[in-house]
Every structure is written in C-alpha cells, then in structure tokens.
Amino acid sequence: MDENSRGCLYIVATPIGNSRDMSPRGRQILSEVDIIAAEDTRRSMVLLNKLEIKNKLVSNHKFNEYGKAKYFINEMLSGKSVAVISDAGTPCISDPGNELIKAAVEAGIKVVGIPGCCAAVTALSISGFDLSSFVFCGFFPRENAERRKLLEKLRRGDSRTFALYESPKRIMELVDFFIDAGAKCRLCLCNDLTKLHEMCFRGSPAQVKEQLLAKGNYDKGEYAVVMELEEDYIFNKVEHTVSAEAMLVDAMVSGGLTSKEAVAAVLADENNSYSKNELKAAALNLKRLFGG
C-alpha cells in the first residue's frame, strides 16, 4: 500500500462471470484498502463474500459519480486508500470511474491499475478477426438513425475490427439492423463469457440470427460483440475538394517552384490528402498538358 501521507486510488478489475478469475493481487488490494467504491454495492457484495473480503462498500454509479468524487478525494487526502470496482470487468470501460480518476490526478493522488478481466478484450482475443488494430465502441446506439451514422463512420475509419457491448434485450434488434443495412461483415457474439454456459455465435449477420433463434433464450446474459468489416465494404477512396494538379500549380506559381519541388511542398502541407504517387502522377499530367 502507498506509505505516503496521501492515500492511493486503485482501479481493480473483477471477474466478468467466473469468480475464480479474480487475480491474487486484486484480491489482496480489495482486502487492504479502506474503502471500496462499487458500481452496485449489492452485486459487489456477492463477489466480496465469495472472496471472504469484508470492507467498507460505498456506491459509485453513473448517477452519483460527480458528487461522490469529492468525498473519495477528501478521504484519500486524509490518508485513506480507495479501490474502484465495477459490476464486472475493468472499471471505466463503459462503466463509472473516469470522473474520480480525473479528480484524483488533479489532486496529485497516485492512481494504480490492477489488471484483470475485460469482456471486450476477451471477446476480441477469441474472435479470430484481424486485431492489428481495433476500435472499442462501447454500447451501440439504440436508434437506427444513430446506428446508421455510426456504421458509416466505422466504414470510413482505418480499422476493420470493432468491439462493442449490447443488452441481451436488444441483441436481436442489433443483428436485424446489420441485416437490413446490408452490412458486409462477420460477427462474433459472445454471450455469458467465462460462465458455465458461455456461447459464441459466429458468421454473417444472417447466419448469426439463425444461431440465436436456434438457441431460443438468446435474450439472457450479457453480450460482447466483435465485428469485422469486409475489405470491399470499407470506404477507401479519399474525397478531395481540390485536384492534385490544382494544388501543384498553386505551389509552383506562389512559390516559384519546379514541379518536383511543388510535389515536396504539397506533401509537407498538413491539409494535403494526396499520396506521393498521386502527386507525381499529377505532375506528369501537367507536363503532358503544358509541356516543359
């Protein structure tokens, strides 16, 4: 524990379903801190009882985190140490905790992460999708109009793989949205991860829907969803507002540059969205048009 006069803030990951996944270090921290800030004290009490930990539980959910942050900060400034836990998994990943961390950093209080389970990372790790880069989207929007906007945004990004959470009551609605939107993607829906009856549903949105219907009670248990967009479904073409030739001519005229120098100048411009090869091709096109 922190031996300084100020307390320490620990961000402790808890199991996402199987209590045996609690790390020894996390268990030790929870048993030693003065206060445990929990998203839902009733749910957290179940875990703490299994771990035989008896400590002071204080609620820290999304409806009171702004007001409670000051209380926790004052306690830590007086020398007490606080551990933040969520209902399951790593705090602050679509869970409360960020406001308290921000306040602790501003107050000069040490913040220590105690790693462990995270449903999104676990789902990504077993998806079999391209994980060279990925984006965590939190909970997908509820309204279809917002869903369409987000899907279009994802199609314009640099990553093909996305992790998100969805309520079991809306999981079929989400799959139907992907079907109706004609989304070209593969899905990996992970239900009740680490629990005895965990299941994964894999395939196209239509294939996943068939699997959910075959399961029957698909609207039970939490879902972590991983989506991989097909390569030809991504918007790869950059929309340019000014032609490459126009940018080169402007650089040549305003700076008195040669075509080669103009290519280098445009490449160095932070507003440029053309590649080096595209600019070279534009320079050759100008040479063919005007000679020289």
Image: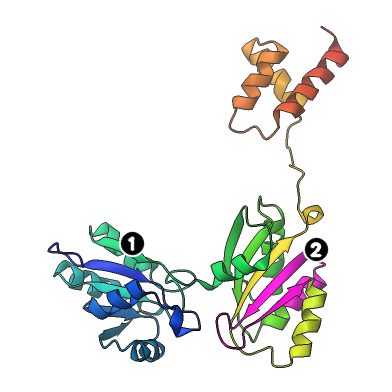
Closer to the camera, 264 or 240? 264
Residue 40 on image: x %, y %: 40, 86
In the image, 284: left or right of 173? right
Query: Tag 1's secondary structure?
Result: helix
181 magenta-colored = yes
The numbered mark at residue 53 is: none
Residue 268 on image: x %, y %: 59, 25
Residue 62 on image: x %, y %: 41, 77
- Please give the range of residues in magenta: 175-203
The residue at 76%/22% (across/down) is: 280
Q: Toward which corner of the image does residue 10 lie, by quadrant?
A: bottom left
Q: Toward which corner of the image does residue 194 lie, by quadrant?
A: bottom right
Q: Which residue is mark 1?
A: 102
Quarter of the image for the N terminus: give it.
Answer: bottom left
Residue type beneath disc 1: Lys
Q: Are marks 1 and 2 in contact (CB under 8 Å)?
A: no
Q: Which residue is mark 2?
A: 184
The residue at 39%/80% (across/down) is: 61
246 magenta-colored = no
Dot 1 surroundings within 10 Å: few (below 14), some, or many (20 or more)? Answer: few
